[in-house]
């Protein structure tokens, strides 16, 4: 997907060409349901401001009052449950494929993500990657059965960055679950087991509910917080240049340069 100036700004990547990928991406729903049920016993149904579903995060983040980058907070048991899920073949495969896709379509952004992540971990070895072969610093698992999101911006993510969104489930993509990129004017069928890269801090987005009965939808989202990059640029300290300090034109030029002309 390109904007009116032909900047590549979103990619409908699709599914990996891996044997039985469709079957694997449906089978993982059983594991996700088991984990969700135990998480609900620990901390409630998890209904959040973006939708009527349980979501949990893992990985490294910075912002919202943190003095320095740190691991997203979970209880020890929540951490154990989420790590078991992330260690499955399907979740590792999704993360690796998302990172490789970012490298293919947005190589400069991939390098910026990977370099910043390496830098914060070198500065604080207590921090750990999601996976050794993934450039994204963090993830959110949106648990089944009713994972659909209200329209929103991910304003804490890197302005010029992209997040990777995986759709999971057993629903018919013609009957709902469509991804809407509001500012770009697109309504996109989003089949289970498929990946989309999108600039979630720039484009208002969300997805439709599903009109079918007795079907499941979930999602796996990988991203990097903008605060990580400002922390690195500022010499491993909070802060970083603002739009005013950069100058509006320089700020726009820097961020637009991350989106190649296609």
Image (cartoon, rainbow, N blue to C red):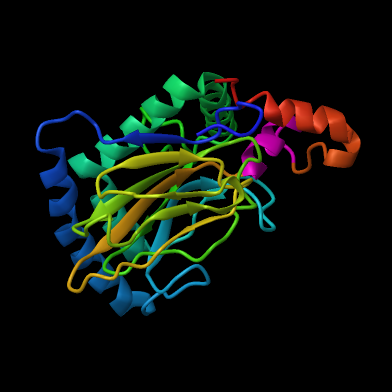
Q: As drawn, is 87 to the left or to the right of 140?
A: left
Front position in the image: 76 or 245: 245
- Residue at horizontal 38%, vertical 70%? 53
Q: Which residues are magenta?
A: 226-237
Q: As drawn, is 195 to the left or to the right of 192?
A: right
Front position in the image: 25 or 179: 179
* Residue 245 is one of the magenta-drawn residues: no
Rendered position, 162 above or below 57:
above
* Residue 235 is one of the magenta-drawn residues: yes
For residue 44, what is the image quadrant?
A: bottom left
For residue 108, what is the image quadrant?
A: top right
Residue 182 in percent (x, y) is at 57, 53
Q: As drawn, is 75 to the left or to the right of 70?
A: left
Q: Main secondary structure of the magenta part?
A: helix
Rendered position, 93 above or below 173:
above
- Residue at horizontal 55%, vertical 28%? 8
Residue 10 in percent (x, y) is at 50, 36
Q: Quadrant of the C terminus?
A: top right
Residue 5 in percent (x, y) is at 66, 28
């Amino acid at each position: 997907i390109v904007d009116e100036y032909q900047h590549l700004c979103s990619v409908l990547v699709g599914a990996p060409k891996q044997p039985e990928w469709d079957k694997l991406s449906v089978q993982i729903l059983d594991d996700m349901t088991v984990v969700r049920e135990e998480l609900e016993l620990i901390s409630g149904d998890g209904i959040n401001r973006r939708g009527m579903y349980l979501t949990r995060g893992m990985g490294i983040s910075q912002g919202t009052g943190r003095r320095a980058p740190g691991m997203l907070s979970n209880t020890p048991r929540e951490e154990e449950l989420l790590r078991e899920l992330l260690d499955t073949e399907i979740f590792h495969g999704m993360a690796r494929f998302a990172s490789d896709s970012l490298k293919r379509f947005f190589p400069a952004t991939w390098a910026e993500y990977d370099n910043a992540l390496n830098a914060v971990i070198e500065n604080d070895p207590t921090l750990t990657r999601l996976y050794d072969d993934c450039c994204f610093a963090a993830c959110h698992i949106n648990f089944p059965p009713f994972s659909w999101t209200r329209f929103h911006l991910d304003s804490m993510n890197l302005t010029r960055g992209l997040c990777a969104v995986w759709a999971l489930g057993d629903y018919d993509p013609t009957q709902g679950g469509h991804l809407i990129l509001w500012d770009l004017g697109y309504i996109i069928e989003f089949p289970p087991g498929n990946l989309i890269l999108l600039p979630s801090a720039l484009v208002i987005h969300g997805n439709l509910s599903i009109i079918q009965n007795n079907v499941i939808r979930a999602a796996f989202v990988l991203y990097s917080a903008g605060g990580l990059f400002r922390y690195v640029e500022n010499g491993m300290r909070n802060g970083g240049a603002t739009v005013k300090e950069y100058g509006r034109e320089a700020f726009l030029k820097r961020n637009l340069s991350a989106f190649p002309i296609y």
